[in-house]
Every structure is written in C-alpha cells, then in structure tokens.
Amino acid sequence: MQRLEKETAIITGASSGIGRAAAELFAREGAAVVLVARRAPLLDEVRGTIENAGGRCAVVVGDAAEDSTMERAVDAAYADFGGLDIAFNNAGTLGPLGPVESLELSGWEDTLRTNLTSAFVAARHQVPAMRKRGRGSIIFTSTFVGYTAGMPGMAAYAASKAGLVGLTQALATELGGDGIRVNALLPGGTDTPMGRTVANSPEARAHVEGLHALGRLAQPGEVAQAALFLASGASSFVTGSAMLVDGGVSVLRS
C-alpha cells in the first residue's frame, strides 16, 4: 500500500535537492503534489518525471516568502486535488558566508526571509486549509547547524534555521488540538547543489564527510525518506520534534 495514498502535499523548494527528491518520492507513495519554486524550467522537469511515472502534480512558480505564491499553492491544492493534507516547507538558502562583521545587513535579511519568513508565510496559508480537513502534517527543513553544532562563518544560515525549530515548537502547541502535527527535519551534510557550495573541492568534501559518524554525505533521497516518515501516519504521535537526520555529525567528536 502506498503510504500517502489520497493525500495532497505542498512542497516548497521542489526544483532541486531534497525538495525534488521528496516531490518524486511523495508522488510514488500516492500523494498528489503541488510543487513550489522560483525556477520554472526545473519545476517542469520535476513535473515531467512525476507525470511520466503516473503521478499527479501541479506547479506554482514563485517566491515561497510571498503571500501570493502560497495563496496560489493552497488554491492549486484545492482546485486540482480537493484539499491539503501535508506541507513540506523546504525552501532555503545558504546565504552569505563569512565572519559576522563582514556580513551586509541585506544578506542577513535575505537569508532570514528565505529560510524563516517563508516558513511562517507558508504556515499562515496552510493551517486554515488543514483545519478544514481536521488533520495535517507540516514539516520544516532546518539543520543541525546552530542546533547541535556551531560552524564558523554561517551566522545567518544558523540563526534562520534555528528559528525554524522555535516556530515548529510554537505551532505544534497551537495546532495539536486541531489534529495538525508540526515537525522540523534537521539534515546533516547532503549532496545537493547547495551542499556542494561548501564541499566545493575534493579536500573540502573529505573534510565535511569526516565530520559525520557515517563518514559520508547524505543523498537527497535519504533525507526525503525521513520527510516521508513525518508526512505519513507512521509518525502519528510525533509533533514538536527536531528530528536529526545528520549521519551522526551531532555526536561525533574526534
């Protein structure tokens, strides 16, 4: 049996990396998926892959931090598939890297907007739709950075992603009575286009891999499997959690 049969999911940041892997996995597991991202050509590629495999898919091109984008996404969930059950709010950016004193305020604000404000905007539109269902699962993509480990030069990224854990906890307490679960997914280093900007040479990749107890980076599909757990009924008593999917980077000290 497909684990998301007859469910509808919105996935932001769906054009590449973890978002794309989750979109394709959720569709294989029976969900109708509404894909949200800014890059239309890449979204069309994902849609083609899903539909060619017999899946159901709608595409919304736009910035996930814009009210109008998330309004269109929820509208598409209703118009095309009858409602909304799952939201994987995964859109994110690494942002500018470097010492705090070298960061421009504009770069700091852009990072918080993409990583944290977009999640707030998404939830504002998704929650009323899920209340109509009487249930739902909201998932945010955070990170171990700024939660279990500090990384130099990543202040904006760490602060914005750590904020998602606080948002998760607040929403979990607000929405539990409505049958809506809210969780944060905290990946370790993952072999995505964004991840490769840090692991950008054989030496840098080897260093990042060595930070993990498993001695390697995650593949996007491995993190997508964890998102599937949080989206599905298998996690029916899980809410308010910060779920580490980090290959042991948070516990390895060597």
Image (tube, helix red, strand yellow):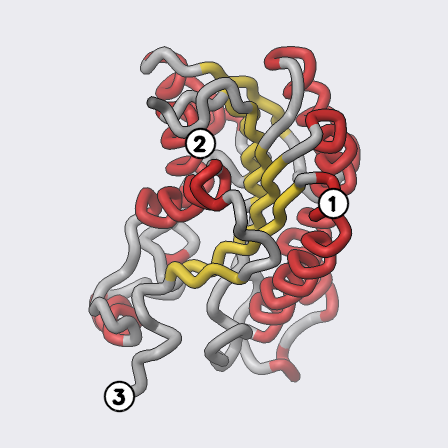
Helix, strand or loop at mark 3: loop
- Any part of residue 82 in sight: yes
- Measured as percent of width and height from the top left, residue 138 is found at 61, 43
Residue 228 falls left or right of residue 10 = left
- Measured as percent of width and height from the top left, residue 180 is found at 66, 41
Please state which of residues 99 and 47 is positioned toward the viewer in this rendering: 47
Quadrant for the C terminus in the image: bottom left
Q: Earlier in the sequence, mark 1 or mark 3?
A: 1
Q: Evaluate if marks 1 and 3 touch, with contact meaning CB atoms under 8 Å apart.
A: no
| Residue positioned 47% across, 68% down in the render | 144
Disc 1 residue type?
Answer: Gly
Q: Which mark is residue 23?
A: 2
Q: Residues under labels 3 and 2: Cα distance?
A: 36 Å
| Other residues around mark 1 within 10 Å, as few (<14) / some (14–19) / many (≥20) | few
Disc 2 residue type?
Answer: Ala
Please state which of residues 32 and 234 is positioned toward the viewer in this rendering: 234
Please give the residue where the numbered disc 1 appears in the rendered image: 177
Q: Residues under labels 1 and 3: Cα distance?
A: 44 Å
Q: Nearer the viewer, mark 1 or mark 3?
A: 1
Please give the residue where the numbered disc 3 appears in the rendered image: 254
| Residue positioned 31% across, 48% down in the render | 222
Please state which of residues 24 and 194 is positioned toward the viewer in this rendering: 24
Helix, strand or loop at mark 2: helix
| Residue positioned 57% across, 61% down in the render | 95
- Measured as percent of width and height from the top left, residue 182 is found at 62, 49
Q: Earlier in the sequence, mark 2 or mark 1?
A: 2
| Other residues around mark 3 within 10 Å, as few (<14) / some (14–19) / many (≥20) | few
